[in-house]
Amino acid sequence: MKNLILVLVVIAFTLDSYSQETFTLSSKDLGGNSTKIEEFNGFGCTGENQSPQLSWKNAPEGTKSFAITMYDPDAPTGSGWWHWLVFDIPADVNELKTGAGDVSLNLAPQGVIQSVTDYGAKGYGGPCPPEGHGWHKYEITVYALKVDKLGLDENTNAAIVGYYLWNNTIAKAGIVSYYQR
């Protein structure tokens, strides 16, 4: 009887560990591909440059803030292209609304910082791959961070933001979107 109880406890413990949900990022706006709505408006692109809605759940214990990045590793630059860098998102926030990447609209939560992208502007800069260059992959990542603030400002470049993210990440989750012109 003791062996049966021990087996049942082990099974219950194992099932509980498998049923825990993981840190997840999703979007109501993005499917597998970006559209003209997300596409940048400039550099030869004529899109609406609207950042997608993003939401995340099941952040790990100890999360004190979040950050979000959007990166194109396929950009023909030798180092990819940073499209969006958002940080100092409070731990009690789990969503950015559609269009929150337009800093002039003030749709991002209070105190959130959107720093300079590789376009040289603050906020969201959508996909704009060179015409005929094929499909580019856009990696959108949410980082659960162990600090309340990164201690950076809106003029901080992507390399420095990335370094601070690397040093303060507890967990990350992501989605991928593709786009070509």
Image (tube, rainbow, N blue to C red):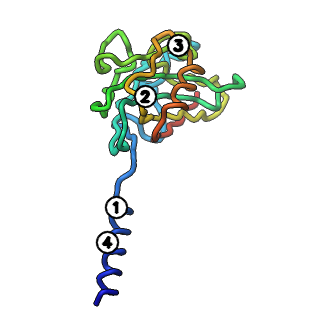
Q: Nearer the viewer, mark 4 or mark 3?
A: 4
Q: Residues within 10 Å of mark 2 (few under 14, many from 20)?
A: many
Callout 1 secondary element: helix
> What amino acid does circle 3 point to?
Thr
Residue at the extreme bottom of the image, as rendered? 1
Residue at x 46%, y 11% (from the top left corner): 154
Dot placed on the residue nearer the N-terminal end, 2 or 1: 1
Quadrant holding the C terminus: top right
Q: Is residue 28 above or below residue 14?
A: above
Q: Secondary structure at mark 3?
A: loop
- The residue carrying mark 3 is 156
Q: Is residue 104 above or below residue 141?
A: above
Are the two marked residues, 2 and 4, in contact with CB atoms closer than 8 angstroms?
Answer: no
Q: Which residue is mark 2?
A: 67
The numbered dot on residue 109 is none
Amino acid type, residue under disc 4 in the picture? Ala
Amino acid type of disc 2? Ala
Q: Secondary structure at mark 4?
A: helix
Name the residue type under label 1: Ser
| The one of 71 and 91 positioned closer to us in this rendering | 91
Q: CA distance from mark 3 to mark 1?
A: 40 Å
Spot the residue most to the front. Answer: 2
From the image, tell me which residue sits under label 1.
Answer: 19
* Residue at the image position 39 percent from the left and 30 percent from the top: 66
Please give left or right for residue 166 compared with residue 75 in the image.
left
